Image (spheres, coloured by chain):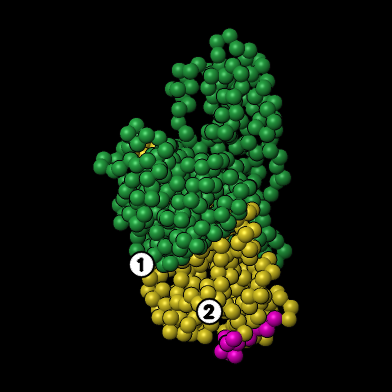
Chain colours: A yellow, B green
């Protein structure tokens, strides 16, 4: 049994808890929270909810600690700190800061003799793997990543900060024509605007200036100005009824050439269509938590990423069964 | 530089030769053939074509020998035999016999201290990897593999054996409705007939009984009887003009559920659209040849499959660049 700890109990932590039920070789030991543990109700009977401050009491009782905090402020300190005492896995997703985070975690785990895996999930994670595999197979080619259709939390938050907005939900949507062009193998050059559109569902305060809100959204630098953006004003009831899910997904496509005169074109495509972004991310993390456990058993200490993990380590099935049934 | 030998110079061997040109960290040392070497013309200047019988003269001069023979009779003996002297990679693709082949190769390489990787390519190969990743992530789910649109050499050969047939080309085609049902996440149960159709282009002898040929094709057990099959009679000129390519491809799709009550559905899809089946297979093999080289450098001896290879080993790029640009 792989003994799992969940550190942080939001959407991702709840997803890990649900995933543990689908993986009989894993068990949940404890959920750690910075809130008052008495106020946190979890879905698993008989499992302790402990205060984050007491985490050191669990040294030796947890094989892999799953960090479920945010990339902006939580993980840069939590992952290295906890890695001194536990094998850890996180879903650090600020792409530009991954090398820095890697170094910081690696120096801790190498010293402590623990194992860490950072940036598990689907992007970074499964999408990264597919970019790597496809580029290694087709060196003469070009990569494209499209996201959506799905909810962007960051963009939804940006809209909520506008005066007169009560709540909002933003969907990132890949442009069908761009997808079709990439799939055709022509390796088009695509601008930001040509790849994705943004659709916003906004609940405004009564009497708010809707025209101003729409203008502020559409001209917001970085978030919306470079995109074709659609704004729909809806009621709070409609938002709750029609937009409470957290779907997401996307596409990683590489087209490339082979042959003595680059005469043959190939298209490799990986896509995800997810009803629940946090639950899918949690499912990827739990499979990689199994790998962390196995790598630690093989005395592979230090920090790793999905790029380092032999695929067989992710599966609970014996190797002989894998090659007999899946290869 | 990774020094590569090509053992067998058919479509796959030529594909390896072309792929080596796209991978500057690899170089072709020699091509081995069972034909008269003087009769074999290769595309690379200054590289030896040697008789297969002289292969032992190259011990120590080749880092990875790429075996390009067939799975039926060549590889079961060639891979273990050559593995005594060389690190080897093959594309053994008789799925049912992979465990047996694995054992036979593994016992040689463990004794000889060499490294082997069997069954590289796309199915087995990239498709296998995607079945493994998807099933580890979504344990509560169902897998589907579709092939095509592409040329099946085995089915084309079966038609050619019918009396009165001069030549033939058979395409395996996935059924769009079946693909759509699987993508919708409903996990349908599909019969053989519901998943693929077969389309045959046949050149018949002058005066042959076309009705009989068509009947013999459509009722042929194992090959066609379980499928909806279409037969087109065409001229030799048309066959050469319109059907001389070797395209292939396919889809690996897994849909699965997550959540405390399995309330969320996810669909993971991997697909390939290939202009040239042998050149793409060769491109996969060459990336894994790089991995074999690296594994041997780390003293990882014995037989391996794509399930054992850390993805980073496939890329010529340094790890720091991979995590900075692809993760």
Q: Residue at x 53, y 27 (%)?
A: B169
Towards the viewer: A272 or A74 = A272
Q: Residue furthest right?
A: A45
Direction from residue A91 to residue A42 in the image, left or right: right
Q: Can marks 1 and 2 be said to lie on one chain?
A: no
Mark 1 nearby-residue class (10 Å; few <14, some 14–19, many ≥20): few
Chain to which the residue tagged by mark 2 belongs? A
What numbered label is drawn on residue B36? none
Tag shown at residue B320 = 1
Location of mark 2 (residue): A87
State the SS at label 2. loop
* Disc 2: CA contacts within 10 A as few (<14), some (14-19) or many (>=20): many
Residue at the image point whose x is 42% and y is 77% from the top: A106
Quadrant occupied by the N terminus of chain B: bottom left
Residue in the picture at 40% in, 43% down: B53
Q: In this view, does A177 lie above or below A50?
A: above
Q: What element carries label 1?
A: helix
Could you say where residue B313 lies in the image, as x and y percent from the top left? 42, 61
- Let me know if residue B226 is in the magenta part: no
> So how many labels did they put on this image?
2
**Viewer-side residue, B127 vs B112:** B112
Q: Please report the bounds of the magenta region as a residue range.
A: A47-60
The chain letter under disc 1 is: B
> Residue A98, image x and y in percent?
40, 70
Query: In this picture, is B22 found above or below B225?
Result: below
The correct choice, above or below, for A163 with respect to A320 in the image is below
Camera-side residue of A99 and A68: A99
């Amino acid at each position: 049994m792989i003994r799992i700890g969940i550190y942080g109990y939001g959407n991702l932590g709840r997803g890990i808890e649900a995933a543990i039920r689908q993986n009989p070789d894993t068990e949940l030991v404890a959920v750690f929270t910075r809130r008052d543990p008495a106020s946190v109700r979890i879905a698993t009977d008989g499992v302790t909810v402990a205060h984050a401050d007491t985490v050191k009491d669990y040294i030796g009782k947890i094989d892999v600690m799953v960090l479920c905090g945010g990339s902006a402020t939580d993980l840069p300190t939590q992952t290295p700190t906890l890695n001194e005492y536990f094998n850890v896995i996180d879903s650090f997703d600020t792409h530009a800061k991954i090398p820095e985070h890697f170094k910081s975690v690696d120096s801790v785990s190498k010293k402590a003799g623990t194992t860490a895996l950072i940036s598990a999930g689907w992007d970074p994670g499964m999408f990264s793997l597919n970019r790597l595999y496809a580029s290694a197979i087709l060196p003469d080619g070009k990569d494209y990543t499209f996201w959506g259709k799905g909810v962007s939390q960051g963009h939804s938050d940006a809209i909520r900060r506008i005066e007169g907005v009560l709540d909002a939900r933003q969907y990132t949507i890949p442009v069908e024509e761009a997808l079709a062009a990439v799939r055709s193998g022509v390796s088009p050059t695509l601008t930001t605007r040509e790849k994705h559109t943004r659709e916003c569902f906004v609940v405004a305060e009564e009497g708010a200036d809707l025209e101003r809100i729409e203008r502020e959204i559409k001209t917001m630098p970085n978030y919306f100005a470079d995109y074709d953006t659609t704004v729909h004003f809806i009621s709070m009831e409609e938002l709750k009824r029609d937009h409470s899910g957290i779907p997401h997904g996307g596409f990683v496509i590489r087209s490339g050439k082979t042959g003595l005169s680059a005469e043959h074109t190939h298209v490799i495509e990986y896509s995800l269509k997810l009803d629940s972004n946090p639950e899918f991310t949690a499912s990827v993390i739990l499979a990689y938590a199994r790998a962390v456990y196995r790598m630690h058993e093989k005395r592979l200490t230090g920090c790793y990423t999905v790029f380092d993990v032999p695929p067989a380590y992710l599966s609970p099935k014996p190797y002989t069964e894998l090659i007999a049934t899946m290869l």
